[in-house]
Image (cartoon, rainbow, N blue to C red):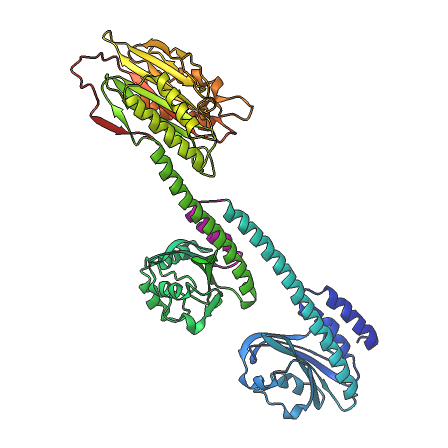
Amino acid sequence: MVDDTWSSALHRLWQAASRAEEVSALADDVYAPLLATPGVHLVVGTRWEDRQVLRYMRALAAGSDSPVITATSRSVPEAAVREPGDEPEVTRIPVAALDDAGWPEAELLRRTPGATFVVCTFRLDHRGWASLGVGVDASADVAAVEGRLAQAVDVIVACHTGILQRGREARRGADDALLAEASLQMDSSLDVEETLRRVARIAVPAVADGALVHLLRSEGPEFVAATHVSVQQQRALEEIGRENLWLAALLARRSEDEDTVFLSGPELDGSPFADTADASDASDASHGDGDGARPGAAGGDRHSTVISVSTLRARGRVVGSITFVYQRPEARLPSSAFLHSLATRAALSIDNALLYELRRHAVLSLQEHLLPSQLPVTDQWDLSASYEVGDPMLDVGGDFYDAVPRPDGSIALLIGDVCGRGAEAAALTGLARHTLRTLLEQGTDPGTALSRLNRALRQERASRFLTAVVATLVPRADGTALLTTCSAGHPSPLVLRSDGTVSEVLTGGLLLGVLDDVSYESHEERIGPDDTVVLFTDGLTESREAGGAFFESVLPVRLAALRGFDAAHIAESLTQQAKAYRASGQDDIALLVARWTGVPPGADLLPHPLQLVRTAR
């Protein structure tokens, strides 16, 4: 027996309620004081869901040391009439009048002395209700008992409300953390499909048990990614995402809806997510692999399946959809507001990736038009080029190169670099390359060609300067070739000799587009069979390692190690080495490589090449 007064017991009950993580933890502090009330022989509580589903019943009788607890999920249709309104309701009912069909407490009450059942019914949340009652005899002060019941219920409701509030706050904190992490993960990739796959991976299992992501194309939804907590069910989910007609029709209908929709029960009939036996037919329609795994199919004591569909909308247009599959209690389903926030973030990340892809294709297309699509091929010259975009934002660069056959059977090589990036740099790049190419095709010498380009830039009032090197290679009867080089402030070309030595071509000259009436001097030297001329932009030499050293310091050694290789291998190898070398620097890298084969003129060769080879990009 409890000797404390009711006020002391109620005080302890409030203290316990402030600490409780489950309402059931209050049972001892509620039942024992009530049972100590004069005239009370039995205390019994019930918990109901969905109006008439009894979840559990707990009873403690006078003189008993342990309660009787019945856990169940029994449907009691007649109990629906007992469901309270918004406020607690206290009722007195003679035990003899209790009908077992609607009062599961009746059997226990009949086992104890007492003629009256005093019960308080109250609502805990929107999903269900509860009752707390006592069996009393004629000696009880029923009004006092009713007051104590009402006070105990106040504590229970307050405890439950606090638990729910703390749960919501914890859920909001977890949701905010998940959304922040999702944004970081999704924004870290500018690849469309990788972004979509990250959306699916982030959501499982934190948000749902499975996820499907589709991208909206002009012809309809296109499956991109799926994931599930079960590997076996993930394979089936992928098949559903690709080929299931029910899902495709659902996504097509939902493509313009902004609100998230939840579907369950009969709404999933005919779908691969249905919980009924008929769902096998829908599974067959999905063209699965026949392993019997159906994402969302309920079996045994698993929870019924719920799916949600959220439209991915960014900047006023629909970019796709995300479908979540849930096999968990209703209390663990995410809110529509959370799914809307996740979908909004995912849509923006996907839209950014799509815009990046469009820009990337546009830039690459423009870059291709600024570079020659082909280089000439002859038995005299082994030519190749390499171009590596260094700007992660994919703005058009100003590097250019070309190889131009000349009327006298020689060939002219040119390479240049416009200051800066973007549309203005691209315009100057096109002007410079095509001006030099036209002049060199007409037989203009390198110095004159550069001077005339400088004059054209000054006349156009170009706001940017550029550097360039022009080199002509004229075969000699003795099997050598005359290399004539003229530079306008550009890095000096290198010559890899057949014996493995590397020398720098002496050049000088003012930048193009800075002053009027500039003249450029040429430098001449002989190259022999298997000697290789390498022209490049400063993106190669200025690639910097973490320690601060430039690739320029190791370039001669790296080039010497490529002795004996053809021009294509040399160009690609140097580009990749510089790319791997640099820890900083974002400049483009352009290389033009020419290896002299040693074939003299008059060796039954056509004066001009009739064959072209596509240049490296």
Q: Quadrant of residue 398?
A: top left
Q: Nearer the viewer, residue 589 or 562?
A: 589
* Direction from residue 37 to residue 217 in the image, left or right: left
Q: Position of residue 514 (x, y in %)?
A: 47, 23
Image quadrant of residue 136? bottom right
**Closer-to-camera residue (211/199):** 199
Q: Looking at the rendering, which quadrant does residue 148 occupy? A: bottom right
Position above or below: 500 against 124: above
For image coordinates 41% across by 34% down, the residue present is: 426
Q: Position of residue 433 (x, y in %)?
A: 36, 28
- Residue 201 lies in the magenta stretch: yes
Q: Residue furthest top?
A: 478
With respect to residue 337, does 96 lie above or below? below
Instruction: Please name whichever residue, 50 or 493, is drawn nearer the observer in this view of the structure.
Output: 493
Q: Would residue 494 be counted in the magenta stretch?
A: no
Nearest the eye: 503 or 375: 375
In the rendered view, tell whether residue 27 sits above or below residue 422.
below
Q: Is residue 62 left or right of residue 391?
A: right
Up the image or down, 488 lies above or below 120; here it is above
Q: Is residue 593 visible?
A: yes
Q: Residue at x 52, y 57 (%)?
A: 342
At horizontal 43% and vertical 49% (from top left) the residue drawn is 354
Pick the quarter of the image with the N terminus. Answer: bottom right
The magenta stretch spans which residues? 189-209
Give x and y (percent) for residue 399. 41, 29
